[in-house]
Image (spheres, rainbow, N blue to C red):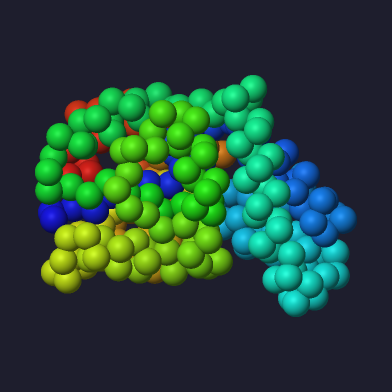
Amino acid sequence: MRRLLLFDIDGTLLSGGPAKSSFIDAMVDTYGTAGDAEGLSFAGKTDPQIARELLDAVGLSGDEIERGFEPLWTRYLAYLEARLPEDPVRVLDGVPDLLESLAAHEDVGIGLLTGNIFGGARLKLGSGGLWNHFVFGSYGSDREERDHLPAVAVDRARELWGDHIGPDQAIVVGDTPRDVACGKAGGTGTVAVATGFFSSSDLEATGADYVLDDLADTDRVVEILIG
């Protein structure tokens, strides 16, 4: 395997959809509150981290938060699945062509590195017709701290393709400073894309290896990702 490509989802591959409203409603159903969900930035965080920050801020204990996680995610996924047909995600410009082009390279592993829990990632990408492009990944349901997700993804790649694979063969592609930071923490390359809430200048300040306005220029992006 020559290269592992680890894509973030929200703001990188997709935008829109009912995930935030589904999350808030599931929080209220489970804990009786969603805290200051409109005031907290979700960008670049894992789903469990977001829930914990919101609930910490309103005084719930760690044990209370943990006890609610299983029903929280069950309710969230049920809301998300029910609402996606009426409020679909939008696939960002260039993404389908990029994934098709990358799939033609047999020595490239196309994966995910996302703060979404696994079921949320599957539903969102499935709604956009993209789920089948991804062979492996690491998710917010694997680790609450995003910086731990590159190691999870590399371990899963090793299970598929052998122990010779290391983080130096991986590139994290995302739209937030936290995506860049987790790639650096995990020893991977980093490509930041200004298709979310952060500008190119914001992302350049992170020290990402490359900063792109979007993923629309397929040939250029492929050249950056795999040479």
Quadrant where the image shows the N terminus: bottom left
Q: How many marks?
A: 0
Which quadrant of the structure image shows residue 148? bottom left
Residue 190: where, in percent of width, then height? Answer: 33, 53
Left or right: 1 as drawn, with respect to 194: left
Find residue 161 and report its horizontal and vertical position in percent: 17, 60
Q: Is residue 86 above or below residue 179?
A: above
Q: Is residue 90 left or right of residue 207?
A: right
Q: Where 140 sits versus 13, above or below? A: below
Decide: is 77 above or below 185. above
Residue 203 seen in the figure: no
Identify which residue is drawn at 18% across, 47% down: 108
Q: Nearer the viewer, residue 207 or 74?
A: 74
- Residue at 82% over, 51% down: 29
Image x and y of residue 118, in percent: 49, 52
Q: Is residue 119 visible?
A: yes
Q: Which x, y percent locates residue 82?
A: 65, 33
Q: Return the residue nearer the eye: 213 or 215.
A: 215
Which quadrant is home to the C terminus? Answer: top left
Kindly identify the residue that appears in the image at 56 percent across and 39 percent down.
197
Residue located 62% across and 61% down the image: 48
